[in-house]
Image (cartoon, helix red, strand yellow):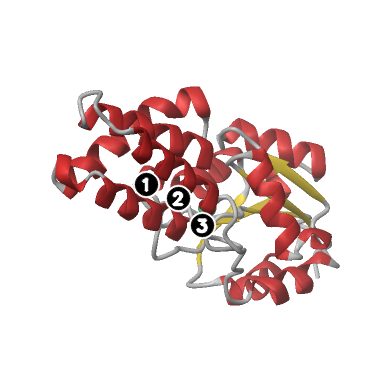
Amino acid sequence: MAASTLTTIGFDADDTLWQNEQFFRMTEDRFVALLGEHGEAADISGRLLDAEKRNLGFYGFGIKGFVLSMIETAIEITKGQVPAAVIAEILAAGREMAAHPVETLPHVHETLEALSGDYRLVLITKGDLFDQERKLAQSGLGDFFHAVEIVSDKKASTYDRIFARHGDGAGRAMMVGNSLKSDVLPALEAGAWAVHVPHALTWVLEHAEEPAGHGRFIKLMNLGGLAESVRKIG
Ligand SMILES: [Mg+2]
């Protein structure tokens, strides 16, 4: 067997290792219901998404930015008349998101366990630092990882830097995640292998075209097939 072609495997966290997007969707439904008398559901959701896009550059990814975007949208939709009680409900919804129990996805534990002896595993995630640290601690998966990188964005240069720091460069690394836009395309661009594990719920801003036919692109229905795919590479 060719010795260690692949030495380092990066894992996305949200909706790859554990559920995340479902909590955003549930909170958005609650938000839309709160403002129900001020507009149509589709319009409120659309305005919220616009606010999130506008605010990414100010607050980054995660719950805190989402809460601020909900407040901003509530002010906008009510033309400045939103009652303080509604703002209080939005803040409470945000705190509930930040306290939800961590629910790991199928095959995660045994896959990390199977790979962690032979490969350096690195957790690479966006989102709020505090929230991601909490979820990692509660998941009980922390010991499988050689390193944890909580980053503000995932670009090719991000993967270059992380795989150089914790491994043998992107050329001997793999990135595994549910987002084509953040986990797959930039990792391929950096020269790594990339494994797409789709999740039924993926934020619209994470959608992208699948790089079908790329020699280092692998698609799996769940993490259950990952160890075998990895060992085929060597
Ligand atoms: Mg994800």
Q: Would you say the residues marked 2 and 1 are in contact, meaning their CB atoms lie under 8 Å apart?
A: yes
* Circle 1 SS class: loop
Image x and y of residue 142, in percent: 79, 58
* Residue 186 visible from this viewpoint: yes
Mark sitting earlier along the chain (2/1): 2
- Identify the residue at image location x=45%, y=38%: 67
**Considering depth in this image, is 225 or 91 the residue closer to the camera?**
91
Residue under label 1: 208
* Amino acid at pointer 3: Asn
- Identify the residue at image location x=45%, y=29%: 56
* Circle 2 SS class: helix
Q: CA distance from mark 2 to mark 1?
A: 6 Å
Tag nearer the camera, 2 or 3: 3
Task: Say if disc 3 is inside 8 Å of ligand 1.
Answer: yes
**Considering depth in this image, is 194 or 205 the residue closer to the camera?**
205
* Circle 3 SS class: loop
Image x and y of residue 211, in percent: 41, 51
In this picture, is 224 found above or below 129? below
In this picture, is 27 found above or below 18? above
Q: Which mark is residue 20?
A: 3
Question: Image quarter for residue 71?
Answer: top left
Q: CA distance from mark 2 to mark 3?
A: 16 Å
Mark sitting earlier along the chain (2/3): 3
The residue carrying pointer 1 sits among few (fewer than 14), some (14 to 19) or many (20 or more) residues within 10 Å by Cα, namely: few
Q: Quadrant of the C terminus?
A: bottom right
The residue carrying pointer 2 sits among few (fewer than 14), some (14 to 19) or many (20 or more) residues within 10 Å by Cα, namely: many
* Amino acid at pointer 1: Ala
Q: Quadrant of the N terminus?
A: bottom right
* Amino acid at pointer 2: Leu
Image x and y of residue 163, in percent: 73, 42
Residue under label 2: 180
